[in-house]
Image (cartoon, rainbow, N blue to C red):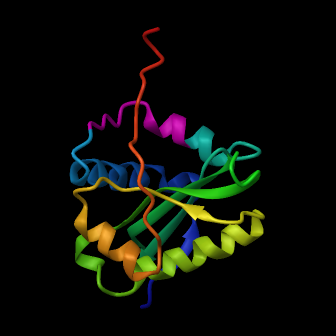
Amino acid sequence: MSPVIRAANPNDLNDIIELTKEIAQIEKAAFDPKGKVEKLNQALFSTPPHLYCLLVEQEKTIIGFATYSTEFSLFEADIYLRINSLYIKPASRRQSLGTSLINELKTQSRKLNCKSIRFFTPDFNNDAIAFYHSIGAKSLTAVRFYLDASNS
């Protein structure tokens, strides 16, 4: 059976968290799943949603996903689609599933009236960088910062 790309539903939250945990391991980032079901449920299924999620499903098994949101670019004075995460399980790679997800994200971008799609990956994630170059993405140089606002 061919893989299907579909929107996430509340029954998918545990699978999304598990995939996010896999991404965190690859990106050498801390990840604690505690409390994530409730927070993701609110972000994905509130009206309007703060986050969108597409899943790649094959034979009733989730094998990949992409999460995205819209943001505003001051430089363009317009909104853009920001990919938060894009991930295909290693055993399912090299089947054009990432490209299929990108194509669906392009469709969603047009539906949301976004002029561009933006995303990032750590500079050591060579597989992701090679993939993004292969789909025609252009690299922008920037330094990513993080500031913990909870302890102010």
Q: Is residue 111 above or below residue 49?
A: below
What residue do we see at 29% from left, 78% from top? 92
Q: Is residue 145 visible?
A: yes
What residue do we see at 50% from left, 75% from top? 101
Residue 121 % position (x, y) = 36, 56
Q: Going by the picture, which residue comes out furthest to the bottom?
A: 1
Q: Quadrant of residue 2?
A: bottom left
Residue 37 % position (x, y) = 47, 39
Q: Is residue 96 above or below residue 140?
A: below
With 40 as the anchor, is 110 left or right in this view?
Answer: right
Quarter of the rendering occupied by the N terminus: bottom left
Q: Is residue 148 above or below residue 141?
A: above
Residue 50 % position (x, y) = 65, 44
With 105 as the anchor, is 120 left or right in this view?
Answer: left
What residue do we see at 27% from left, 54% from top? 22
Q: Which residues are magenta?
A: 30-40
Q: Is residue 89 visible?
A: no
What residue do we see at 68% from left, 50% from top? 75
